[in-house]
Image (cartoon, rainbow, N blue to C red):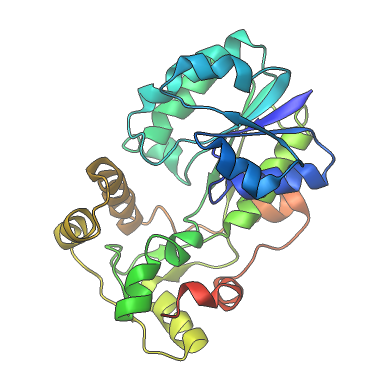
Amino acid sequence: MKILVTGASGNVGRYVVQELIEMGEAVVAAGTNKSKIRKLFGNTSEAVVLDFTKPQTFKDALQNVDRVFLMRPPHLGDPKDLYPFIDFMKSSDVKLVCFLSLMGIEKNPIPPHHKIEKFIEKSGIPYSHVRPGFFMQNLSGIHSEEIRENNEILIPAGKSKTSFIDAKDIGLSVATILHEAEKYKNTTHTITGPESLDYFEIAEILSQVTERNIIYKNPSFIRYWLYYVNKRGLDKQYVNVTVALYFMTRMGTAKMVTNEFEQLTGRPPRTFKGFAVDNIDSFVG
């Protein structure tokens, strides 16, 4: 049987696909752009179109599949958008769904991940929720423009600390769980990097690596929202979700450091400085 990887061209999905292939699994890589998936993985995996808002794409995506990596596309802010696909997985006798959730979500009903977790559990499908800390790739991706062009980090997290984790490490964790599905049925895993850092410390590390003076601007929520919606042109619903996450971060929900990544994989997680060195091109204009 095969493993379906949703969001296969995304930050985490691509690493899930790669790790599963290395483990000898047959992988179906899914997304809304089939040619992009084929370009990424060639003939090492199947490529299928899957759109959570188009139920007609579900059957082909789940054909001969018994395990699923499920992630919420960032543009779908309503948890109900994923419910039809979860129901279809139930009728397809999926034996494990590994859902990419958020650290601390069990105590935070605001982001959509909370309701999605509960819906999966209620469905009766065997599950494993992976709850990572914030992605290091958030800084090398969505927030890198301000770092490259203005030497600024524009994130409304205040003085709070975050236990950043590399998306590649998340991918390995997910692949490990799906590869050993029976072992990890009905489990949850909070995975983090090896240290908890505030954004002033992140700015200092980036300054050392880039040999430039990177400053953490520590904007208000309003300034952050206006900038990313009006100047960067990001979707309002997406920015609203990030505001909720950074609000919770200020409450201390993102600072916990766990050893669950090492327990799952037998490897230590990557440090942010190591990540910054390896991804310096993302931070240099």
Residue located farthest toward the top when viewing the structure as drawn: 91
Q: Is residue 2 above or below residue 281?
A: above
Q: Position of residue 274 (x, y in %)?
A: 61, 75
Q: Residue at x 41, y 65 (%)?
A: 161
x, y percent for residue 125: 61, 17
Left or right, residue 184 beside residue 191: right
Q: Is residue 124 above or below residue 274?
A: above
Residue 149: image x %, image y %?
A: 32, 78
Q: Is residue 9 left or right of residue 235?
A: right
Q: Residue furthest right?
A: 24
- 140 and 131: which one is in front? 140
Instruction: Please state the total of marks drawn on the protein image.
Output: 0
Quick one: which residue is furthest to the bottom in this view? Answer: 211
Q: Taking 199 as reference, is 65 left or right?
A: right
Above-or-below relation of 96 to 282: above
Q: Give me the residue at 24% from left, 57% from top.
A: 228
- Please say if 131 is above or below 205: above
The quadrant holding residue 124 is top right
Q: Position of residue 140 (x, y in %)?
A: 47, 66
| Identity of the residue drawn at 46% across and 35% down | 72
Which residue appears at 43% of the width and 40% of the height? 105
